[in-house]
Image (cartoon, rainbow, N blue to C red):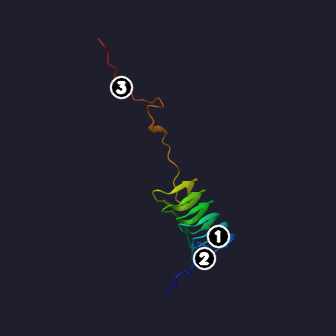
């Protein structure tokens, strides 16, 4: 029989400063300053949460406010009225309409393809304009 992962809930009345490590699932609705570290598991940051921390987890679902970098070996989802000010590195990154994201994102996938070179598509700007037959005026 499979055992469900444990779920820990830190309510909106919770304030924490320091290093928070967990496994399983953590729902964070309060305020935290420091570092959040979980090699596996799901971190859910609630609507009322205010987080000033670097986050390392498998999966991160953000509804609240985060200032800091987010590293996820799985996915990062920004939903609802989420505000994230920092860089995101993950295998999957989902941003819902209306979210505020100020930072850079990087996909960690091992099969990431090199960036294509689009410079050749600018034929008019690069001076490689196809020649058109000229009209002579009588």
Q: Residue furthest left?
A: 138
**For mark 2, what is the residue?**
23
Q: CA distance from mark 2 to mark 3?
A: 66 Å
Q: Which residue is mark 1?
A: 37
Labelled pair 1, 2 in contact (Cβ < 8 Å): no
Q: Nearer the viewer, residue 126 or 77?
A: 77
Which residue is drawn at the image coordinates 56% and 56% (left, top)?
106
User: Disc 3 and disc 1: Cα gap in Å?
Assistant: 62 Å
Task: Find the residue positioned furthest to the front.
Answer: 13
Q: Would you place residue 37 above or below residue 88 in this image?
A: below
Which element is circle 3 on? loop
The residue that mark 3 highlights is 132
Question: Residue at coordinates 65% horizontally, 71% vertically from top-left?
Answer: 15
Q: Nearer the viewer, residue 67 or 48?
A: 48
Q: Earlier in the sequence, mark 1 or mark 2?
A: 2
Q: Position of residue 87 (x, y in %)?
A: 60, 56
């Amino acid at each position: 029989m499979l055992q469900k992962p444990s779920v820990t809930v830190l309510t909106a009345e919770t304030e924490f400063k320091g290093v928070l490590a967990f496994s399983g699932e953590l729902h964070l609705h309060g305020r935290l300053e420091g570092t959040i570290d979980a090699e596996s598991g799901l971190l859910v940051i609630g609507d009322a949460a205010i987080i000033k921390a670097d986050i390392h987890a498998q999966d991160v679902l953000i509804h609240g406010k985060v200032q800091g970098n987010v590293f996820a070996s799985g996915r990062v989802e920004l939903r609802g009225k989420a505000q994230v000010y920092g860089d995101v590195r993950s295998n999957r990154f989902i941003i819902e309409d209306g979210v505020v994201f100020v930072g850079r994102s990087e996909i960690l996938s091992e099969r990431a393809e090199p960036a294509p070179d689009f410079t050749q598509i600018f034929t008019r700007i690069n001076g490689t304009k196809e020649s058109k037959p000229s009209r002579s005026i009588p």
